Image (spheres, rainbow, N blue to C red):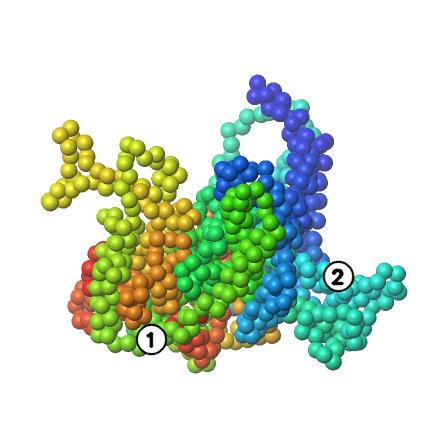
């Protein structure tokens, strides 16, 4: 019986390898390995479509997207339209990275190109093995130059079709009709020019768009709307660039970020969010990404403003003048971002050189400000500094909604956007009405500009998403966090006060520091060890390590460590 | 018949794959690259690396021999008996001798592995290996934090204490002092605390033959050490003197992004780096 049953599987088993091979071939053939996925397109945002719909202009959406394509290009070929004003001002946003990066930054870019980015290519070029230089990732334009202009060096075929197939001598003078960045005025050899091509590389917008497609798009989306395919699985959600707002900037609330602000975030990541550090890429690549992110942000902003203009006008038309002035205005805001930067004058206090006594005094003053109505920190971050994690809801964080009337948004609820708060009597017991129902109110956490529930930082977790350096915290207090309920400090709060606040916040973070708890535990174990073994070298705190599990009980140890 | 052809094809494919990957390693057929890019382990340069490699080879040779023998027997059986498939199957009770044999041999192999790794394991994992002669814990250089999806390194700053205001963080790059073979006879190693913010990660530095899971809620003392001689021998002529850190535990959708690099510096340069990071920490860029 069993044999017979098994026998029926024979035909399938025999065909299986062939079926399997066929399937594999099918899978590999259907994968698209080519760069640039031709089908990527910039779309219009949901809010654009909604507002056009509202004023009965839904049919005009092609006009908006057409205008945007003229101004900003496509994902395959992104570029800024150059206006006469830009020409007059000798500015070219397509090459803004070229002139905006400082000399020190440029030096780092070149070093990175040489020692990391094009290490393999340059190794082979130096060894004279031009024919086997491999194609680098995300450098399509550079590679095109290598293939065409440098053909005489590696394939032996001159650039012009029909020439004689002779390889040039790498030590001979470089073709004077060709150009590579950084070429010395008195010329260079082919070998030198080949090296320069790679070491002096700065990404074009097209190359950065390709890198964005692979590295960033899956979260931040094609248009930078924070709506890529992986976005819905993330908490917090990826940034939507199209508002032109970036949270962690060193300039006044509402202003555009500096180039350095965006580079900082790419380098450091945003800790405990899904935005990792991208320091594994070269400096040039990160600057290129900033260029492209800026293009996406400007495109989104222009889109929103054009739609506003359109719905305000009677005809629903977009006059050329309006387009140009909007476009120029959006660009100018970004161009001037660096000029708004005043923090260079800020002197960061060196707490590491400050006495404990002074730190305590200043921290105490910071605590007073924290609890005071002027800075008002406690109203969102809670009296214990635990923000959204606080056991009692901070008073300014949410608003009461009518539980019967209000239509609860299930997605907002799933993301922690609603809280029930019970009434309690003086003894702390939950109050109930005559029917035994718990008396409670429904609170809705205030949303930020992107529609996310506000989650004020829990300082005791010692994690600061926008950076934990003193200057980072200073900027958060001074300028607020763009697009969120975290406001800029009022004028009455002096810089000195802000630093005191920062010191207090760092104290909150440090007081629960697990490493310190760990140290403390080690010391306690050493003491116990000493007592058990009957000799008292109790001022020695580092010995006697035990491996009886490393789970900490946060609270106990914090009490014991007596900050 | 088809079974025989399939087996033959599979064997040929395996052989070709083996030869091609060996040839590629030797002659860079598929990817021309400088000599230090390999498909195999990178050079080892930790003070413990050689012992780890020896264990790796011991186990690899043992399992390869066993693999060839058992798979050979399997293929032989399929080959030999597939021609007689019209025969009726015969039920046998089993063979005590054979069972004894295939229990005893693996057990012996496991014992060989167990005994040969003991001293290396102790040197690598035991707390006693991270203490000085008086039994005091060696100081911690920095905390290694795994979090979705990057590696971060928190240094205690110049005061050597965590949780004070001069702590600084380095994302992506782990910088550690080099062991001076002549001067640091007694300074055996650099000690770190390995921790995780969220889920399981695994801290893996192939060059140092170091791999350890980062477990949320657990603080593990780990150590690594690089000799200046090894450093000079292997990294000396290179433009890029860093080597990779990767996450070796699937930790979520962004696992592939989770990398870092190690930079090993002589004491003086390391001190300079700490100065630089402290300046950055109190800077205003
Ligand atoms: Cu991981």
Query: Which residue sits at x=33%, y=74%?
Result: A349
Q: Nearer the viewer, residue A110 or A307?
A: A307
Q: In which quadrant is the C terminus of chain A drawn?
A: bottom left
Task: Evaluate whether residue A376 shows in this view.
Answer: yes
Residue lying at the far left in this picture: please name it: A427
In-image side of B76 versus A58 (left or right): right
Residue lying at the far top in this picture: please name it: A1
Q: Nearer the viewer, residue B75 or A88?
A: A88
Which of the numbered marks, if any, corresponds to residue A59? none
- Name the N-terminal-most of marks 1 and 2: 2
In-image side of B43 versus B153 (left or right): right
- Where's residue A100, x and y in %? 56, 68
The residue marked by circle 2 belongs to what chain?
Answer: A
Q: Residues within 10 Å of mark 2 (few under 14, many from 20)?
A: some
The residue marked by circle 1 belongs to what chain?
Answer: A
Which of the numbered marks, if any, corresponds to residue A350? 1
SS of the residue under disc 1: loop
Q: Residues within 10 Å of mark 1 (few under 14, many from 20)?
A: some
- Where's residue A475, x and y in %? 37, 65
Task: Evaluate whether residue B63 shows in this view.
Answer: no
Which of the numbered marks, if any, corresponds to residue A147? 2
Query: Which residue sits at x=16%, y=39%?
Result: A430
- Where's residue B27, x and y in %? 70, 61
């Amino acid at each position: 019986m069993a044999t017979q049953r098994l026998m029926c599987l024979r035909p399938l088993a025999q065909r299986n390898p062939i079926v399997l091979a066929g399937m594999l071939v099918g899978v590999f053939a259907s994968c698209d390995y080519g760069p640039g996925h031709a089908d990527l397109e910039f779309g219009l945002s949901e809010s654009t479509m909604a507002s056009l719909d509202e004023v009965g202009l839904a049919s005009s959406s092609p006009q908006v997207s057409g205008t945007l394509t003229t101004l900003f290009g496509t994902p395959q070929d992104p570029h800024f339209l150059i206006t006469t004003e830009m020409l007059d001002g000798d500015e070219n946003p397509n090459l803004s990275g070229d002139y905006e990066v400082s000399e020190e930054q440029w030096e780092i870019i070149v070093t990175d190109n040489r020692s990391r980015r094009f290490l393999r290519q340059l190794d082979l070029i130096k060894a004279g093995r031009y024919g086997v230089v491999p194609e680098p990732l995300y450098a399509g334009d550079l590679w095109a130059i290598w293939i065409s202009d440098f053909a005489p060096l590696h394939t032996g075929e001159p650039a012009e079709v029909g020439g004689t197939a002779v390889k040039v001598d790498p030590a001979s003078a470089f073709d004077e009709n060709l150009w590579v960045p950084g070429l010395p005025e008195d010329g260079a050899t082919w070998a030198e020019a080949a090296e320069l091509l790679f070491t002096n590389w700065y990404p074009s917008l097209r190359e950065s768009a390709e890198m964005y497609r692979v590295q960033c798009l899956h979260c931040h989306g094609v248009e930078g709307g924070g709506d890529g395919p992986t976005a819905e699985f993330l908490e917090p959600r990826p940034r939507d660039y199209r508002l032109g707002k970036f949270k962690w900037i060193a300039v006044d609330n509402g202003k555009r970020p500096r180039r350095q602000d965006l580079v900082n975030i790419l380098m450091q990541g945003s800790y405990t969010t899904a935005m990792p550090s991208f320091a594994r890429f070269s400096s040039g690549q990160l600057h290129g990404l900033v260029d492209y992110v800026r293009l996406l942000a400007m495109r989104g902003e222009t889109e929103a403003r054009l739609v506003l203009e359109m719905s305000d006008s009677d005809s629903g038309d977009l006059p050329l003048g309006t387009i140009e002035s909007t476009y120029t205005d959006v660009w100018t805001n970004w161009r001037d971002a660096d000029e708004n930067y005043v923090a260079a004058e800020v002197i960061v206090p060196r707490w590491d050189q400050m006495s404990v006594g002074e730190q305590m005094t200043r921290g105490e003053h910071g605590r007073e400000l924290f609890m005071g109505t002027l800075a008002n920190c406690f109203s969102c971050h809670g009296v214990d500094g635990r923000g959204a994690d606080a056991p009692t809801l901070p008073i300014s964080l949410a608003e009461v909604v009518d539980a019967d009337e209000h239509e609860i948004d299930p997605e907002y609820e799933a993301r922690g956007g609603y809280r029930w708060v019970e009434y309690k009597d003086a003894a702390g017991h939950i109050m109930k009405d005559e029917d035994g129902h718990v008396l409670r109110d429904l609170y809705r956490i205030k949303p930020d500009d992107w529609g996310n529930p506000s989650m004020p930082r829990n300082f005791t977790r010692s994690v600061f998403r926008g950076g934990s350096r003193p200057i980072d915290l200073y900027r958060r207090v001074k300028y607020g966090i763009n697009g969120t309920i975290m406001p800029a400090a009022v004028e009455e709060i002096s810089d000195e006060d802000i630093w005191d606040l920062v010191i207090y916040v760092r104290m909150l973070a440090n007081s629960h520091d697990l490493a310190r708890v760990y140290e403390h535990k080690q010391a306690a174990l050493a003491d116990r060890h000493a007592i058990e073994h009957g000799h008292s070298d109790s001022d020695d705190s580092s010995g006697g390590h035990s491996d009886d599990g490393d789970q900490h009980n946060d609270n106990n140890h914090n009490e014991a460590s007596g900050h | 018949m088809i079974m025989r052809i399939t087996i033959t094809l599979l064997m040929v494919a395996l052989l070709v794959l083996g030869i091609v990957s060996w040839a590629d390693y030797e002659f860079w057929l598929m990817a021309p690259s400088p000599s230090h890019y390999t498909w195999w382990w990178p050079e080892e340069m930790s003070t413990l690396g050689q012992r780890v490699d020896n264990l790796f080879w011991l186990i690899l040779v043992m399992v390869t021999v066993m693999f060839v023998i058992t798979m050979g027997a399997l293929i032989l059986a399929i080959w030999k008996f597939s021609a007689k498939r019209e025969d009726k199957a015969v039920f046998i009770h089993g063979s005590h001798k054979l069972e004894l044999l295939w229990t005893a041999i693996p057990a012996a192999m496991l014992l060989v592995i167990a005994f040969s790794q003991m001293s290396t394991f102790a040197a690598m994992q035991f707390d006693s290996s991270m203490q000085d002669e008086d039994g005091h814990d060696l100081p911690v250089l920095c905390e290694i934090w795994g979090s979705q999806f990057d590696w971060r390194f928190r240094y205690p700053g110049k005061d050597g204490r965590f949780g004070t205001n001069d702590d600084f963080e380095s994302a992506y790059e782990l910088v550690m002092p080099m062991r001076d073979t002549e001067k640091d006879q007694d300074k055996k190693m650099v000690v770190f605390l390995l921790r995780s913010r969220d889920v399981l990660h695994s801290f893996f530095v192939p060059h140092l033959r170091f791999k350890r899971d980062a477990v949320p809620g657990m603080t593990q003392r780990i150590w690594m050490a690089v000799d200046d001689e090894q450093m000079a021998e292997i990294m000396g002529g290179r433009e890029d003197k860093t080597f990779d850190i990767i996450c070796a535990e699937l930790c979520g959708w962004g696992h592939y992004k989770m990398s870092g690099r190690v930079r090993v510096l002589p004491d003086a340069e390391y001190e300079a780096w700490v100065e630089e990071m402290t300046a950055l920490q109190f800077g205003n860029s």
